[in-house]
Amino acid sequence: MTAFEFNEELKERCILLGATRCFTKYVDDPEYKNVPFWFNSIELPLHMNKNYIMVVCGLVDSYLEEMEFWGIDKQDNDVSINEKGRYITYCFYYDKETFHKTMCDS
């Protein structure tokens, strides 16, 4: 399984738990300081129960810890809220080739 596939699995699980939208964007633009990177966003509805939000946040943390264990340790994450929804965002600072490499034999 690659880091990319593992990240896709995380997003699918978040959708099953009630996320309204999840996306990944590869950024390789010299305008940004730390390029290239993979920007990920998980959008949760404003009305989502606090307990479900905690479950989704815990799931994301678990996946990020597992990725760190596999060597994908250059990462940042943040949780925010605005008038449209709640967001969990996280970034991996790796190029396409590294992120698509095999991580383990699962």
Image (tube, rainbow, N blue to C red):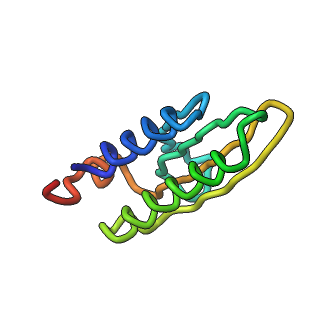
Q: Residue at x 55, y 58 (%)?
A: 58
Counting from the top left corner in percent of width and height, residue 16 is at 48, 33
For the C terminus, give its image quadrant: bottom left
Left-right relation of 19 to 73? right
Q: Residue furthest right?
A: 83
Residue 65, image x, y percentages: 44, 67
At 73% across and 41% down in the image, what residue appears? 86
Figure check: 92 above or below 47: below
| Residue at 43 percent of width and 35 percent of height | 12
Left or right of 35: which side holds 103?
Answer: left
Q: Is residue 23 left or right of residue 78?
A: left
Q: Locate residue 23, reporting x and y percent.
A: 52, 34
Numbered-mark total: 0
Q: Position of residue 25 (x, y in %)?
A: 50, 37
Q: Is residue 64 left or right of residue 30?
A: left
Give the residue furthest to the left.
Answer: 105
Taking depth in this image into account, of 20 and 70 the one nearest to the observer is 20
Q: Is residue 89 above or below residue 83?
A: below
Residue found at x 79% / y 44%:
81
